[in-house]
Image (tube, rainbow, N blue to C red):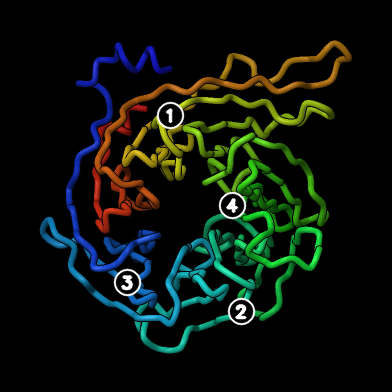
Amino acid sequence: AAAAAGAMDTTDAPQLIEHINHSAAYTPYEVRWVPSSARMAVMGLRANGRGVVEVHELEAGKLKLAADGSFAHGIKCGTFGAASLEQRNPAVGDFDGNISILDLENLDKKPVWSVKGHETLVNCIDGCGGLNIGCGSPELVTGSRDGTVKVWDPRVDKPVVSLEPESDGSDPNDRRDCWAVAFGNSFNDEERVIAAGYDNGDVKLFDLRTNTVRWETNCANGVCGLQFDRRDIEMNKLVVTTLESKFRVYDMRTEHPTEGYACLTERAHKSTVWGIRHLPQNRDLFMTTGGNGGLNLYKYCYPRQRQKKDPEGRALGVPGTVELLNSKVISTQPVVSFDFSPDKEGLAALACLDQTVRVYIVTKLNLY
């Protein structure tokens, strides 16, 4: 893929065009488009340790502040995945272990729902069952520095499921750190899985229907981000990004009894691959974000046959390939959050540790 990218005619490739570069007075950790709107929610940490959520709208080539709220603790992560299209209230996790659903129209008011979910920092959050996408009831999943992964029903204050490391009485900050979580396989009212990635390279797939760990593996490097290409279909692909400039794409359609899922490993960014976002309008295109301040746009190409038989006649998955469509280094600091607009193909928002929030337009995606 790298060789093909080097020889590629970039005039026909998707272009990554900066539309807005907005300087923030805080460190932004998460940016998410507000569904069915030209607004985005930006979440982060001020220098005094307080949290901030700002809602910006696109207006004449600039970001216009529409609403903002201040919080006792820095906000690390957020999602609209479990919100209704009528309310569109984001769920956020903060530096003190709290998980809250905020009223987007009244950010300074008391949260709609809030719970002290973890002993320490909430690293990651994902939502499912909202926005009229997929099946099943709205749920949230959170991963924390305390090593736990918890699934929440926003109607109750106790976790529905809690995956905890073996308790040895140690300081919660010394346990395995969960860096990434994602929902998937939510194609009917019963089925749903969560994938969790840890700082030691572990990836665990937990089946919420059977309450069991369905599969686990180790990527040899800490898992910074992971995402299913669609959360509302039968598991198809899972992309896992890690430290040491690598990412993996697992074909989740065929599980072998001993080999597990087929996987492709690719090098990217020459630094940590911080995150992964699939294009909502085309699940085979995805963007990775790098610790070098880079964006890489890939296309996944399926193999001619997605499974073959092993010597004993059992089905064995066949990994595909990835093609680098374009790449661009946009900052000297890591791109820590990236989100494609669910409504406008190619419109993207991102947050950098150089304290900027940017809006990008990715062109020609309809050709793929």
At 30% from the left edge and 71% from the top edge, which residue is drawn? 54
Name which residue type carries label 4.
Ala
Q: How many C-alpha atoms fall within 10 Å of the one at disc 4: few (<14), some, or many (≥20)?
A: many
Q: Residue at x 59, y 52 (%)?
A: 182
Pinpoint residue 31: horizontal percent, then vertical percent.
36, 59
Label 1 or label 3, whichever comes before in sequence order: 3
Give the class, few, some or many, for how many residues have Cα within 10 Å of label 2's Cα (few <14, many ≥20): some
Query: What is the spatial separation of the Cα atoms under label 1 and label 3, in whole angstroms?
Result: 32 Å
Give the alpha-carbon distance from disc 2 to disc 4, as whole Å: 21 Å
Compare residues 186 and 106 and report the one nearer the observer.
106
Residue name at image x 37 percent, y 69 percent: 45
Name the N-terminal-most of marks 4 and 3.
Answer: 3
Q: Which mark is residue 182?
A: 4
Q: What separation in Å lies between label 4 and label 3 (alpha carbons)? A: 29 Å
User: Looking at the image, which residue is at 84% across and 29% down?
Assistant: 257
Amino acid at dot 2: Lys
Left or right of 61? Residue 12 is right
Please report whichever mark, 3 or 2, sits nearer to the chain's N-terminal start. 3
Residue type (three-letter) at the residue carrying disc 1: Ala
Q: Which residue is mark 1?
A: 268
Query: Which residue bears the numbered disc 3?
Result: 47
In which quadrant will I find the C terminus? top left
* Element assignment for label 1: loop
Rounded to the nearest angstrom, the CA distance separating label 4 from label 1 is 22 Å
